[in-house]
Amino acid sequence: MWLQYLLVLVGAFLFDVVPIPFPPACTIMIFLQIQFNLNVWWVIIIGVIGSILGRYILTLYIPLISGKIFKQSKNEDIQFLGKKMQEKGWKSQAIIIAYSLLPLPTTPLFLAAGMAKIKPIYIIPAFFVGKFTSDAIMLHLGKYALQNAHSIMQNAFSFKSIASFVFGLVLLGLILFVDWRTLIQKKKLEFHFKIFS
């Protein structure tokens, strides 16, 4: 029985450690909960732990990769954005919680945090609150998913799922291509597409 819970942990970790907008980790959590008839609360707790570990590792390795892939000016720009975000205090925490509650990929949020070299302790507690809440809601809807599995599988490539993926890519593009320093300091929107080394 604990092997199935280990699969929940590993699955949630793998879904949230990748640096591209991927389906939310709750999708693998719901699948495993239904497949093995697991206790929903244990799945939520173990899955959220796996997600947090994945996002934590992501914030640790992204600065190493971004330093090799992106120009120094782009990395400095994202770091400037991160410092501004930290200056906002509780407002930034509220935004992180609200964003984590939405059915949107949180990958862009953690990529920006990692590139900005924001300490994970600053972002993960707020992410935990949002993630635990949204995953609890999603997994409790698992019974509905079980009863309507055929319809859900048909909608896996629905307009909504594709739109969510595209929106995640757009957010990632905004993080990478907007000149954040110019936008914040001069209130002028500029894009720089030559960001790679």
Image: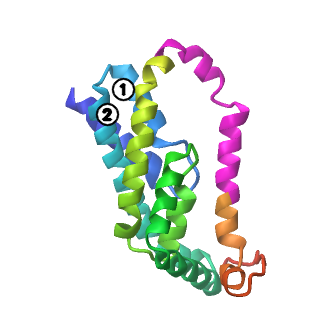
The kind of secondary structure the magenta stretch mainly shows is: helix
The N terminus - image quarter: top left
Q: Is residue 104 magenta?
A: no
- The residue indicated by pointer 2 is 43
Q: Which residues are magenta?
A: 146-170
Label tally? 2
Q: Residues within 10 Å of mark 1 (few under 14, many from 20)?
A: many
- The residue indicated by pointer 1 is 33
Give coordinates of residue 144: x percent, y percent: 49, 18
In the figure, 159 relative to 183: above or below? above
Give coordinates of residue 172: x percent, y percent: 64, 61
> Residue at horizontal 66%, vertical 84%?
181
In the figure, 177 relative to 3: above or below? below
Quadrant for residue 121, please give it.
bottom left
> Residue at horizontal 54%, vertical 68%?
112
Query: How far separated are the C-alphas under marks 1 and 2?
Result: 7 Å
Q: Is residue 154 magenta?
A: yes
Give coordinates of residue 116: x percent, y percent: 51, 76
Residue in front for this viewpoint, 173 or 121: 121
Report the disc number at residue 183.
none
Quadrant for residue 78, please give it.
bottom right
Residue in front for this viewpoint, 100 or 66: 100
Amino acid tagged 1: Gln
Residue in front for this viewpoint, 124 or 58: 124
Amino acid tagged 2: Val
Q: Residues within 10 Å of mark 2 (few under 14, many from 20)?
A: many
Secondary structure beneath dot 2 equals helix
**Mark 1–mark 2 contact, CB under 8 Å?**
yes
Which one is earlier in the sequence, the residue at label 1 or at label 2?
1
